[in-house]
Every structure is written in structure tokens, then in C-alpha cells.
Amino acid sequence: MDRIPNLNDLLAKEFAHANEWKAKGILNHLFVKSDNTGAMLVMTADDIDKAKELVATLPMFSYFEKVDYSYIEDEF
């Protein structure tokens, strides 16, 4: 995280995106690692390509070292 300029500004924008997605029913859960080196988003999307499009709009996306995508079914 030290290599990210204007980190506080970007974090505020990142969480604004997350809050907007939450309000729209796109984001179900956001889990952040305790050491702040990663996160997991549980999203409602029609397909993985749509999820990839959305994630690419995050303000900090260009600083992500790795992004893994998985499609899961919601059982309960």
C-alpha cells in the first residue's frame, strides 16, 4: 500500500464505489484482509465478464497485483 500515491483519497473513492454497489444490490459482501493487502468482494452479476467490467472501474484497480474471479451459486 505504500507504493500507492494519494492512498487516502483513493480509499475514499474506492469505498464510495462499494457503497454505491451495495445500494444498487450489486455488492453483497466486502471482506478486507486484516493486514490490508487484499480483499474479497461477493457480487451479484449476470456473468464473470460483467463482474470483471465492474471491478475494472474501481479507483485502485490499476494497483491490484492479482485479481481472481469465481462464479458461485447462492444456495442459502
Image: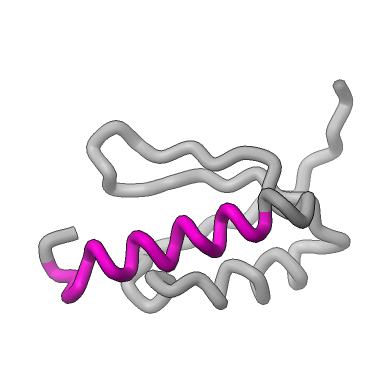
Which image quarter: residue 72? top right
Depth check, front residue: 44 or 24: 24
Q: Residue at x 55, y 75 (%)?
A: 56
- Would you say 22 lies left or right of 40 here? right
Residue at 86% across / 21% down in the picture? 76
53 displayed left or right of 5 = right
Tally the numbered discs: 0
| Extent of the magenta region | 3-21
Residue 26 image point, x, y percent: 75, 54
In the picture, the quarter occupied by the N terminus is bottom left
User: Which percent across, then down, holds residue 38?
Assistant: 36, 48
**Coordinates of residue 51 in the picture (x, y in percent):** 70, 64
Q: Is residue 42 above or below residue 69?
A: above
Q: Nearer the viewer, residue 12 or 41?
A: 12
Is 36 covered by the magenta stretch?
no
Q: From this viewpoint, which residue is outermost toward the top? A: 76
